[in-house]
């Protein structure tokens, strides 16, 4: 389907395994699918692009806030 990504295509775009997409969905770390065809979830490319743009960087963990280093002394 034009403009939409399947689970396999999404995994390829993100550079992760298909099972990781399922894990991300379970944890709520990835947007919900925009559409379903039968039982097949589909994500709009625009939704994924927006999510990637606003996604926290490497090393971020859910629920943790970044803190400045403590002052010495």
Image (spheres, helix red, strand yellow):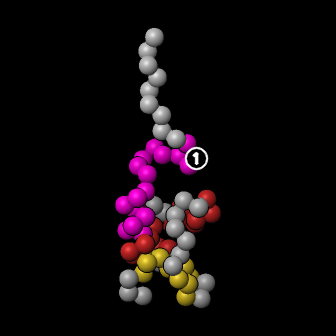
> Residue 44 appears at what percent x and percent y?
43, 78
Q: Nearer the viewer, residue 45 or 54?
A: 54
Q: Residues within 10 Å of mark 1 (few under 14, many from 20)?
A: few
Figure quadrant of the C terminus: top left
Total marks placed:
1
Q: Residue at x 62, y 63 (%)?
A: 26
Task: Please say if 56 is above or below 68.
Answer: below
Residue topped by disc 1: 63
Most extreme residue toward the top is 73
15 or 71, nearer to the observer: 71
Query: From where the camera sits, is residue 61 visible?
Result: yes
Whether residue 52 appears in magenta in the rendering, the answer is yes
The span picked out in magenta is 48-64
Residue 24 x/y as whole percent: 56, 61
Where is 19 relative to 43, above or below?
A: above
Q: Is residue 47 above or below residue 17?
A: below
Q: Is residue 19 left or right of residue 49?
A: right
Q: Nearer the viewer, residue 39 or 32?
A: 32
Residue 18 magenta-drawn?
no
Q: Position of residue 68 (x, y in %)?
A: 44, 31
For mark 1, give the secondary structure: loop
Name the foreground residue: 47 vs 18: 47
* Image location of residue 12, percent across then percent down: 40, 68
Residue at position x 37%, y 61% in the image: 53
User: Does residue 12 appear in this view?
Assistant: no
Residue for point 56% across, 84% down: 36
Image quadrant holding the N terminus, namely bottom left
Identify the residue at horizontal 48%, vertical 34% (top origin). 67
């Amino acid at each position: 389907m034009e403009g939409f990504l399947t689970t396999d295509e999404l995994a390829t775009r993100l550079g992760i395994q298909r099972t990781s997409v399922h894990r991300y969905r379970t944890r709520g770390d990835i947007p919900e699918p925009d559409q379903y065809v039968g039982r097949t979830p589909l994500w709009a490319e625009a939704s994924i692009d927006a999510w990637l743009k606003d996604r926290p960087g490497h090393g971020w963990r859910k629920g943790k806030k970044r803190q400045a280093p403590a002052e010495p002394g």
